[in-house]
Amino acid sequence: MNFLITIKEIRENFFRKENIYFITLIGVIFFFDRVTKLKILNNFSEETFYVTDYINIDLTWNIGIGFGFLSTTSSFFYSLVTLIIGLVILFLFYIFIRSERIDKLIYSLILGGALGNVYDRLIYKAVPDFIDLHYHNFHWFTFNVADIFITVGILTFIIRSFFVKN
């Protein structure tokens, strides 16, 4: 019975004015991620394009989770990971609805990026990563705009957890 009350509460709180602003932010992040990925997919091949001495555009397809972890050729494992990511996104939306304003901002960053990447997982069966940061021969993991928002959101969450007492 508590679960049904919670669903009713979420439905009522979802369309509060404050939430609409943050849901719009999620949509803007998702849109910005889509635009950058489509620009890369439509204008770059799998060749490396040198932007500066430290940044390349290098299109790679990530079949794992963040930064290529858990990459596999198993379609079952890929589907399982995608399902788990979907469930985590739903759980984050639940937490988002019940959170305070500053936390809603943090969850918006994470959700906007996560939705961008899960969209690619469902449509392309992989996530296009294309930002290659490097210093001489040391290359960081190739990533995309969604990964930036997810990372900033998670780092902000961690920092906030250390310094803000409830």
Image (cartoon, rainbow, N blue to C red):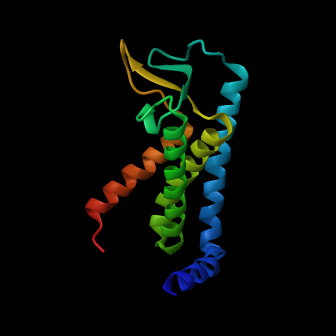
| Rendered location of residue 138, percent (x, y) | 35, 17
- Give the vertical position of 97 relative to 82 (above or below): below
Residue under the point 59% across and 45% down: 118
| Rendered location of residue 46, percent (x, y) | 61, 15
| Rendered location of residue 79, percent (x, y) | 55, 43
- Give the vertical position of 19 relative to 109 (above or below): below
Position of residue 37 in the picture relative to residue 158 (left or right): right
- Give the vertical position of 101 relative to 90 (above or below): below
Residue under the point 38% across and 57% down: 157
Towards the viewer: 47 or 64: 64
- Residue 152 visible (yes or no): yes
Please state, as top left, top right, bottom left or bottom right, where the C terminus lies in the image: bottom left
Residue under the point 33% across and 60% down: 160
Residue under the point 49% across and 52% down: 84
- Give the vertical position of 158 relative to 61 (above or below): below
Towards the viewer: 52 or 149: 149
| Rendered location of residue 117, percent (x, y) | 57, 42
The residue most toward the right is 42
